[in-house]
Image (spheres, grey):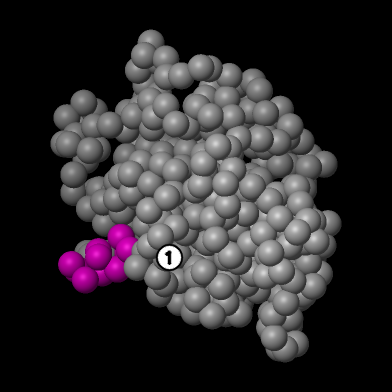
Amino acid sequence: MGATSGAVWGRAEQQDFRSRVRGTLLGAAVGDALGGPVDTLGLDEIRTSYGPEGLVDLPYGYGRRGAVTHHTQLMLFSVDGLIRAQVRRDTGAWHPPTDLHRAYLRWAATQRDWGPDERRKDDGWLAREEWLYARRDPSRALLLGLGDETMGTLDSPKNPGESGPEAVARSAPFGLLVGWEPQLVVQLAVECAAQTHGHPVACLSAGAYAVIVHGLARGESLDGAVQRALSLLAPRPGHEPVTDALQHALGAVRQGMPNPARVEDLVGEGTAEGLLACSVYCALVGEDVRHGLCLAVNQGGPSGAAGILTGGLLGALHGETALPPAWLAELEGRPTILELADDFAMEMTQGPALHGPAGSSPGWLARYPRA
């Protein structure tokens, strides 16, 4: 697997990309915090609990407002793994899926341990963030897929019958590899999805979502990014459920005013392709970020996954400043998310000029071990 070398970045381009990276990660986390607490509720139950308009503000969950779930935790470890992969790309052992697998194993350790283990020095700074050790309802497929050191691959995937949305929900960071060709972004997301969710629907949904984010991070329209995803999926075996779901989302935009019934129709059984379609639809028809996110989570399917996917798209499309400030102020882990986002943006725009021999990297870069 290879990647293109990035062009020289001007100051305005760096600032725009940094805003989109921040927007993607913060938007995804806010969507997760909005939808997570109502993940198991039907629409009628949501309205009973929050009023006739449903959920319109951050609810309480896990003892506070703005709490995130395992979806956001894994997304952040995806970013950590990608930064390490980028730092290691000039070595002979460069294989990004392996770097991501190691990152996911570090997340799995947070679900077993009480807190950071100082003996594991190569775990890096993110694994020392104590708030990430909270167990926020990870699925059985995640825990089984990362329950040992064996890495799932496309030839030998973990949980080959699992088509849930957890893999696609952690895949936005792959789309932020703007120096990579789109087909390589798809391939990396697909390979990393197979580490826990081996069903073709789960893997290809992850690839589609990543390359849609990739288009948005490069300044494309959402419709244009979806069209590119459709063209890249078409040659891949088993693509039909995913491409059909995306086409269904595009068609639903032309069917009148958005409503929960239309969103629930797109979500379907709550598998990966339905949540992907839901997020595309809500991002396309949302009047603003708040409206798009509320539309995504007020339905009877997996609201946390719908929120994180929709928030990632809207954040990549509009940047950090479009996100609701009041929600960001209450978001769990916001300082960590911002620090990680800025490290990623710096690595993507200036990393090659900063890399030195192992152990000599300056400042922030030294916090991402090459081991």
In percent of the image, x 73 and y 83: which residue is there?
251
Judging by the rendered image, the residue that carries numbered circle 1 is 324
Q: Please say whether residue 39 is visible from this viewpoint.
A: yes
Give percent across and percent down for residue 254: 71, 88
Residue furthest top as drawn: 119
User: Could you say which is closer to the camera, residue 50 or residue 157?
Assistant: 50
Considering only vertical position in the picture, is 353 above or below 355?
Answer: below
Considering only vertical position in the picture, is 187 above or below 260?
Answer: above
In percent of the image, x 21 and y 71: which residue is there?
12
User: Could you say which is closer to the camera, residue 178 or residue 94?
Assistant: 178
The reply, left or right, for residue 52 in relation to residue 289 is right
In percent of the image, x 81 and y 69: which residue is there?
265
* Residue kind at label 1, given as amino acid type: Pro
Give percent across and percent down for residue 137: 66, 35
Q: In terms of image quadrants, where is residue 138?
A: top right
The reply, left or right, for residue 57 in relation to residue 237 is left
| Label 1 crowd bin: few (<14), some (14–19), many (20+), radius 10 Å | some
User: Could you say which is closer to the camera, residue 186 or residue 46?
Assistant: 46
In percent of the image, x 21 and y 26: which residue is there?
359
Magenta segment: 10-19
Give percent across and percent down for residue 33: 55, 50
Considering only vertical position in the picture, is 307 above or below 145?
Answer: below
The reply, left or right, for residue 160 in relation to residue 257 is right
SS at mark 1? loop
Look at the image and tell me in which quarter the C terminus lies.
top left
